[in-house]
């Protein structure tokens, strides 16, 4: 046997509940009620998609057909932990920290040269057979407690098969009491699996499908077949828990065949000294002795009661009147498990000791454990029978809670059947909306006493689905693992006959590759969720305000980042991790960078399921605030070397304090700040406004730009207003450039007045300094420019001027602007 010990990381981050809560055997107790009445964490209010879901998966090396078991506050590797035990069909047993998922130890049940068994040409457990039955734990056995496991294996070289009972220390996985021991047995009888006088247990013909039972210091095993592959008979074998010596032995088809005990994995049930179970199809004697027992001791397809006092023996039984035909049709009881009910009182105040079971025939059988009814060929002598109460065959067993049983048969709804006066009501009082395909569902119950009852079942689908129902109203599905988006809670493919196990706020469900672990999703909370810092002077820092981060889960969360946005800062004492149910403080301060409303947020990023958590932050920056209208000034065209009329910018103090203006200037000398009515001074009261006057004096043509800049004590200083304008001008030209004319004649020139950079205005034309007798006439003499050139006709009359060459100056004038050109005039003889 190989042992691997693992030390979990960061164990100090996880808390261990104070009270241990143990699941030591299949379906919680020897009565197989399936109820955990000490569940204080899970309730119908917190088992919802938003608060409950998959925590992690415990990986295994094979299918998990056995129900996981649980021990709370167990010291492993020198540390107290909650521990879950998992067995696989690959013949491995694991212990995991139930709160962290850390592997504590793993052992193999295989000996050197062995593998798990093949599936024996049977599809019931495939592709390999190792540990199929749910083990059982005894906390008082050995130095630390013992887990008892039955494992099947096969020798590689010889092909021989083995069935062994192992007793492992629950803290280390070490074999105890000289184990393991081979499962070997012989029994007197003439039935199958024998030589005519003696039956011999053949390990290759059997598997331990029914869960182990520990009763009065004896570990009981019950054996099934591989499908119905003969020869096989029905063995029940018990071993002393401290010595592993075989001390109990019974075969209940010793002179027949078949009749095995498999119960779809359910364990044999027990009261204080008797064992109850259902047998599969097989030989059932219909000839009885004087006491009503089969003359050949064959109990196929029966509801059995065994006495364990001294020797193992049949104490009572019930068999249906049509047991032979049911066995022949494979409609036997053996697919279901028995449940021992608590004592009940009828309307006459009589106390009844009852047990319930169902199988493939869809009937629910309620037996009186003090007088089960035995066999009658014409009628069923039974305490109560609900005929075809189930829509399909039962492959598993019911659960009991608050005076009701819950069944989930094949193709049927999950059904709740209440008891009234020790009688089972014929119609279910509540049903689920969904139905369950093969093999149906075996429910488990979590509750805090009689309150907060939840029924847990799994659907054998791909992926598997864990479902939770209100135990008082099965129409109320609280949760299923397919609800969350993006497959958040998917935990693996379905596996037959899986029974959920619930302990300490967690649900454990076996799959084909491991165990899905579900619980309250780790969540954290910031409180308060919003903080308003009120008014704070711009540029100053407020008094810090505390925000509390609380870990609402019982396990630690890791904090990766705490950040603020906007004008907010923080300090904290949270560190990198926050223990379960613990809190830390984040102090947030406000330093407004501008007046007015300022918004931001506090964000915590961590390992909680609702990460990130956020709190909204707000405050008001107080002090002066500047508004400028218009946001830009354009002067348009302005003749060069002239100054425009002033344009104004309205400066408003929209803040809550006096604005102190230290300077108002422009960045281009072509633009100048000038005085005017309500011109801005050095101070401006809150809520007031003033005017800033600006002129434009271009010295060259073309586009000019600049900025009006105001320096003050408001945020955003200096504030600015873009300035723009265009320097404009005109030009004068004439054509042709010269004329020849007789002294008594006249001539004309075309004078063009050009608009430079879009000049607009009136240009007057003249010919200053012309010779005597020469006259100039412009038509028109005043040219109006609107951004484009205009033409005037100049007529020159020589007036008898003497022969010669004359230069005429043509001048255009607009305001202070003046431009000239010249033409030549020649007068011949």
Image (spheres, helix red, strand yellow):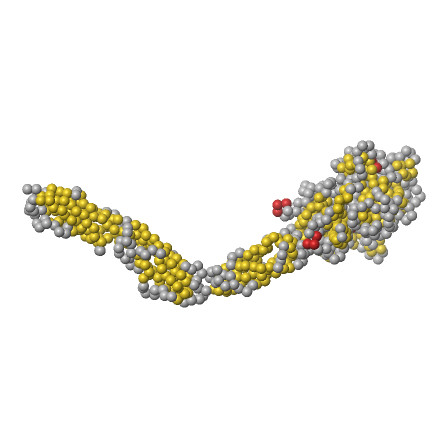
Q: Which residue is situated farthest in the top direction here?
A: 158
In the image, taking residue 672 as reference, residue 255 lies left or right, namely right
Residue 427 seen in the figure: no
- Give the residue displayed 84% in from the left and 39% down from the top: 259
Q: Residue at x 88, y 43 (%)?
A: 246
Give the number of callouts. 0
Q: Is residue 656 above or below residue 336?
A: below
Residue placed farthest to the right in the image?
290
Q: Quadrant of residue 805?
A: top left
Left or right, 309 with respect to 424, comes to right
- Where the N terminus falls, by quadrant? top right
Residue 283 percent location from the top left of the image? 86, 38
In this view of the protein, can residue 15 be seen by the observer?
A: yes
Q: Tell whether 299 sits left or right of 516.
A: right
**Residue 47, relative to residue 359: is it above or below?**
below
The residue positioned 89% from the left and 36% from the top of the image is 199
Decide which of 359, 594 is in the foreground and name it.
594
Image quadrant where residue 748 sits: top left
| Residue visible at 70% across and 54% down in the picture | 12
Quadrant of the frame with the C terminus: top left
Residue 49 in the image, given as x and y percentages of width and height = 65, 51
Viewer-proximal residue among 436 and 449: 449
The image shows residue 285 at horizontal and vertical percentages of 88, 39
């Amino acid at each position: 046997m190989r042992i691997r010990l693992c030390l979990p990381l960061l164990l100090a981050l996880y808390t261990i509940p104070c009270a241990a809560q143990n699941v030591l055997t299949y379906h919680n107790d020897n009565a197989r009620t399936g109820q955990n009445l000490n569940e204080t964490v899970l309730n119908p209010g917190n088992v919802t998609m938003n608060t409950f879901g998959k925590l992690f998966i415990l990986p295994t090396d094979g299918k998990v057909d056995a129900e996981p078991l649980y021990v709370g506050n167990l010291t492993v590797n020198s540390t107290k932990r909650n521990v879950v035990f998992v067995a696989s069909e690959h013949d491995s047993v694991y212990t995991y920290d139930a709160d962290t998922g850390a592997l504590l130890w793993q052992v193999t049940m295989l000996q050197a040269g062995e593998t798990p068994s093949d599936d024996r040409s049977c599809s019931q457990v495939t592709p390999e057979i190792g540990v199929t039955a749910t083990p059982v734990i005894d906390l008082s056995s050995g130095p630390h407690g013992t887990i008892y496991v039955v494992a099947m294996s096969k020798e590689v070289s010889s092909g021989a098969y083995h069935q062994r009972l192992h007793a492992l220390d629950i803290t280390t996985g070490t074999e105890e009491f000289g184990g393991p021991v081979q499962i070997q047995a012989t029994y007197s009888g003439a039935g199958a699996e024998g030589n005519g006088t003696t039956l011999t247990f053949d390990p290759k013909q059997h598997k331990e499908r029914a869960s182990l039972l520990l009763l009065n210091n004896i570990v009981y095993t019950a054996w099934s077949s591989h499908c119905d592959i003969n020869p096989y008979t029905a063995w029940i074998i018990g071993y002393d828990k401290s010595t592993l010596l075989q001390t109990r032995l019974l075969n209940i088809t010793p002179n027949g065949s078949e009749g095995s005990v498999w119960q779809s994995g359910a364990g044999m049930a027990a009261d204080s000294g008797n064992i109850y179970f259902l047998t599969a199809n097989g030989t059932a004697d219909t000839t009885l002795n004087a006491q009503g027992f089969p003359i050949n001791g064959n109990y196929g397809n029966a509801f059995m009661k065994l006495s364990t006092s001294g020797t193992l023996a049949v104490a009572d039984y019930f068999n249906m009147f049509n047991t032979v035909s049911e066995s022949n049709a494979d409609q036997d009881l053996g697919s279901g498990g028995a449940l021992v009910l608590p004592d009940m009182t009828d309307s006459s105040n009589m106390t009844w000791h009852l047990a319930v079971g169902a199988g493939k025939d869809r009937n629910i059988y309620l037996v009186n454990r003090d007088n089960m009814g035995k066999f009658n060929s014409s009628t069923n002598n039974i305490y109560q029978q609900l005929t075809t109460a189930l829509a399909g065959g039962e492959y598993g067993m019911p659960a009991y809670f608050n005076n009701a049983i819950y069944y989930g048969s094949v193709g049927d709804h999950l059904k709740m059947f209440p008891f009234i006066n020790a009688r089972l009501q014929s119609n279910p009082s509540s049903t689920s909306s969904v139905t369950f395909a093969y093999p149906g569902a075996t429910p488990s119950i979590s509750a805090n006493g009689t309150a907060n009852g939840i029924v847990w079942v799994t659907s054998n689908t791909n992926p598997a689905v864990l479902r939770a129902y209100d135990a008082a109203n099965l129409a109320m599905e609280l949760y299923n693992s397919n609800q969350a988006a993006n497959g958040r809670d998917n935990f693996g493919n379905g596996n037959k006959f899986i029974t959920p196990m619930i302990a300490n706020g967690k649900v454990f469900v076996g799959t084909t590759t491991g165990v899905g672990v579900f619980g309250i999703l780790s969540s954290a909370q910031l409180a308060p969720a919003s903080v308003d810092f009120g008014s704070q002077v711009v540029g100053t820092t407020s008094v810090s305000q505390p925000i509390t981060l609380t870990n609402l889960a019982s396990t630690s969360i890791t904090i990766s980042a705490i950040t603020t946005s906007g004008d907010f800062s923080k300090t904290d004492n949270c560190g990198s991790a926050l223990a379960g149910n613990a809190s830390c403080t984040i102090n947030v301060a406000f330093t407004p960078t501008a007046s007015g409303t300022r918004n931001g947020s506090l964000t915590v990023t961590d390992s909680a399921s609702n990460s990130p958590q956020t709190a909204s932050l707000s405050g008001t920056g107080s002090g002066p605030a500047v508004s400028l209208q218009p946001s830009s000034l354009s002067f348009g065209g302005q003749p060069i070397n002239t100054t425009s009329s002033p344009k104004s910018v309205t400066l408003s103090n929209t803040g809550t304090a006096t604005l102190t203006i230290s300077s108002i200037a422009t960045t281009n000398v072509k633009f100048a700040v000038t005085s005017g009515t309500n011109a801005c001074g050095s101070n401006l009261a809150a809520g007031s406004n003033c005017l800033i006057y600006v002129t434009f004096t271009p010295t060259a043509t073309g586009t000019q730009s600049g900025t009006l800049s105001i320096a003050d004590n408001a945020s955003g200083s200096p504030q600015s207003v873009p300035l723009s304008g265009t320097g404009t001008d005109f030009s004068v030209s004439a054509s042709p450039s010269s004329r020849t004319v007789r002294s008594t004649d006249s001539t004309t020139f075309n004078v063009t007045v050009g608009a430079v950079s879009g000049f607009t205005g009136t240009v007057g034309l003249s010919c200053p300094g012309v010779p005597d007798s020469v006259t100039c006439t412009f038509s028109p003499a005043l040219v109006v420019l609107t951004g484009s050139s205009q033409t005037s006709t100049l007529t020159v009359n020589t007036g008898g001027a003497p022969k010669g060459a004359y230069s005429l100056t043509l001048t255009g004038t607009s305001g202070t602007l003046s431009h000239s050109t010249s033409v030549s005039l020649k007068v011949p003889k």
